Amino acid sequence: MRQMKRSMKAGAALAGICTLLLTGCGGQSPFNDMQDAMTKMSEKEASFEKEQGTLQSYEEKEQKLYKKMIQTTKDHTKTVASLSDQALASAAKREEHLKTEKDSMDESKKELKTVKESAARLQDAELKEKADQTVKSIEKRYASYDQLYKEYQKALKQDQHLYQSLKKKDLGYDELKSKLKTVNHSYSKVRKESKKFNRYTDQLNDHKKALYNAADQESKKS
């Protein structure tokens, strides 16, 4: 059975920024600078969220095409070739949308420098601790996505090799079995990295919540 799909939590971890009155006399506080940068992160990840759904729809399309290819007898090689070409076209589209998703994350990551610099300028000890935890969570999440992207790229290439092989008239059972094993192994890695990414997204949500609670307490003191 050919296995596909990844289940990822989107960039909502950086969305829903609450408004906190921590502005100093000389303009915005370091926290508000940090907050603004995280808001920009969320906005730049909008394409990332959209592309996840698109990638999944192409995966499902290819899964259906693959099943049709397997169910088609060797006497219908033209039918298999046509289905394979459709699957290859779908995989090519997936490549394009994966690139768009990656670009979205890379643009979002550019705001990390401002987030880190703003966190370093915080004076309140508790707030700075929560901010540092948030920064580390953001860094881990981006690193996790980069690894997930690499594994998904590899899996997509294995799909393309499989679709191309299915067009061969002399494709034997052992060769097909070997290629399926490679594909399934690749997607096993994708799912593993996807779980990691989701875990880091959850951690970021928790640290972000703790940061905002600390900021709220600090604003009440002033």
Image (tube, grey):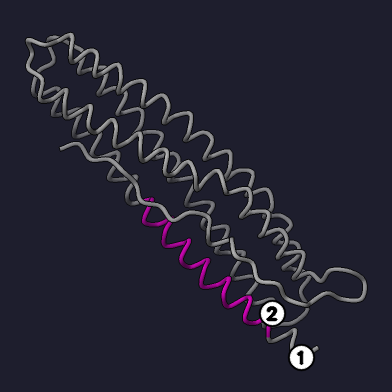
Number of on-image labels: 2
- Side of 62 relative to 15 (left or right): left
Q: Check the picture and name the quadrant holding the N terminus.
A: top left
> Which residue is under mark 1?
221
Taking depth in this image into account, of 146 and 79 the one nearest to the observer is 79
Question: What's the residue at 62%, 75% (across, down)?
Answer: 211
Question: What's the residue at 64%, 54% (across, down)?
Answer: 41
Question: What's the residue at 57%, 48% (across, down)?
Answer: 46
Which region is colored magenta?
Answer: 193-216
Q: Is residue 99 magenta?
A: no
| 42 w.r.t. 88: above or below | below
Q: Label 2: few (<14), some or many (≥20) within 10 Å?
A: many
Q: Quadrant of residue 126?
A: bottom right
| Callout 2 touching callout 1 (CB < 8 Å) | no
> Which residue is under mark 2?
215
- State whether the magenta stretch is mostly helix, strand or loop: helix
Residue 169, horizontal then vertical, whole percent: 14, 9
